[in-house]
Image (cartoon, rainbow, N blue to C red):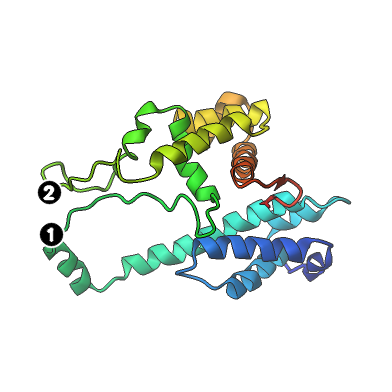
C-alpha cells in the first residue's frame, strides 16, 4: 500500500468536495450508511488513493473530477458491503420467502424527492423516455422478474400516476438544457440505444472514463435545469 499524503486534505476545496460527495452518496444509501462515516472514509480515500490524488497534481486542482471519482469509489464500497450482506441472509428467511406467494410488480422510482426536486437517479431512469414512445405505458420489466405464468397484478401503468408529467419534464430537459454536442451524443447512445460505456468509448475513439465524465456532466446539467438551478462544473454539483 502506498504512503498516505495527508497534505492533500489541506488543499483549498478538497474537504468541501469530500463533504459534498459524502452527503450525496448518503442520500442515495441512507438505509446503509451515515454521512459522517462516509466523510471520514472519503477523506482517507483522498489521502491514500493515487487515482484521487492525481486530480490534485496541477496548480489548479480538478475538484469536479475529484468529486466524481470519490463518489464512484464510495458507492462501489457501499454496494460491495450490501451485496455481501444479501449473500449472508439466513437460509430460513430465504426459504420462507420462497414459500410466500407474492406477485412481483416493479415499483416506479421516486421520481421527485420530498421537496419535489428531481434527483440524478430519477433523471437517469427517465431519460430513455426521450426516445421511446412506449415508455408512457410503464418501465421495462426487470430481468429477474417471475416467469410469465406467475400471477400478475392488474394495475394499468398508464393511469393513476404522474409518469406522463415526468416524461414531459424529461423531454423538456433534453431540449432546453445547454448540453455540448459530445454530451448529447453520449446520452443518446447510452440511454436511447442502450450502449455500454465501453461501446460508446470505442465508437467515439475515447476512453471509457471520458464517456463516464460526459454522462456525469450531462445528467447533472439536466437535473439542475429541471430543478431551476445551475450545474457548477468546477465542483460537479447541482444547485
Q: Quadrant of residue 129?
A: top left
SS type, badge 1:
loop
Position of residue 115 measured from the top left corner of the image (x, y, whole percent): 54, 58
Task: Of the two numbered discs 1 and 2 on the same chain, state the one appearing first in sequence.
Answer: 1
Position of residue 157 measured from the top left corner of the image (x, y, whole percent): 28, 41
Q: Which residue is mark 2?
A: 151
Location of the N terminus (image quadrant): bottom right
Q: Which residue is mark 1?
A: 101
Q: Quadrant of residue 95?
A: bottom left
What is the tally of numbered marks visible in this picture? 2
* Crowd tier of the residue under label 2, counting other residues whose Cα lies within 10 Å: few below 14, some 14–19, many 20 or above: few
Residue 195 visible within the image:
no
Q: Is residue 113 above or below residue 94?
A: above
Looking at the image, which residue is at 37% across and 33% down? 135
Looking at the image, which residue is at 34% across and 29% down? 134
In the picture provided, is 64 more to the left or to the right than 167? right
Q: Residue 7: which disc? A: none
Q: Are marks 1 and 2 in contact (CB under 8 Å)?
A: yes
Position of residue 237 measured from the top left corner of the image (x, y, whole percent): 68, 52
Cα distance in 3D space between marks 1 and 2: 9 Å
Looking at the image, which residue is at 58% across and 54% down? 72
Position of residue 208 measured from the top left corner of the image (x, y, whole percent): 59, 38
Amino acid at each position: 500500500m502506498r504512503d498516505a499524503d495527508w497534505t492533500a486534505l489541506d488543499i483549498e476545496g478538497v474537504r468541501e468536495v469530500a463533504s459534498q460527495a459524502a452527503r450525496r452518496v448518503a442520500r442515495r444509501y441512507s438505509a446503509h450508511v451515515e454521512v459522517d462515516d462516509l466523510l471520514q472514509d472519503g477523506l482517507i480515500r483522498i489521502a491514500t488513493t493515487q487515482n484521487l490524488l492525481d486530480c490534485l497534481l496541477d496548480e489548479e486542482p480538478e475538484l469536479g473530477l475529484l468529486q466524481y471519482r470519490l463518489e464512484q469509489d464510495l458507492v462501489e464500497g457501499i454496494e460491495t458491503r450490501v451485496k455481501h450482506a444479501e449473500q449472508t441472509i439466513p437460509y430460513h428467511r430465504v426459504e420462507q420467502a420462497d414459500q410466500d406467494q407474492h406477485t412481483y410488480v416493479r415499483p416506479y422510482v421516486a421520481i421527485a424527492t420530498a421537496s419535489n426536486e428531481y434527483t440524478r437517479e430519477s433523471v437517469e431512469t427517465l431519460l430513455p423516455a426521450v426516445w421511446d414512445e412506449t415508455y408512457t405505458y410503464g418501465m421495462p420489466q426487470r430481468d429477474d422478474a417471475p416467469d410469465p405464468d406467475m400471477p400478475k397484478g392488474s394495475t394499468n401503468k398508464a393511469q393513476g400516476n404522474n409518469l406522463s408529467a415526468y416524461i414531459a419534464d424529461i423531454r423538456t430537459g433534453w431540449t432546453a438544457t445547454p448540453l455540448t454536442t459530445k454530451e448529447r451524443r453520449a446520452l443518446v447512445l447510452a440511454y436511447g440505444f442502450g450502449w455500454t460505456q465501453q461501446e460508446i468509448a470505442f465508437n467515439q475513439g475515447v476512453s471509457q472514463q471520458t464517456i463516464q465524465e460526459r454522462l456525469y456532466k450531462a445528467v447533472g446539467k439536466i437535473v439542475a435545469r429541471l430543478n431551476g438551478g445551475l450545474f457548477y462544473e468546477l465542483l460537479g454539483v447541482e444547485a
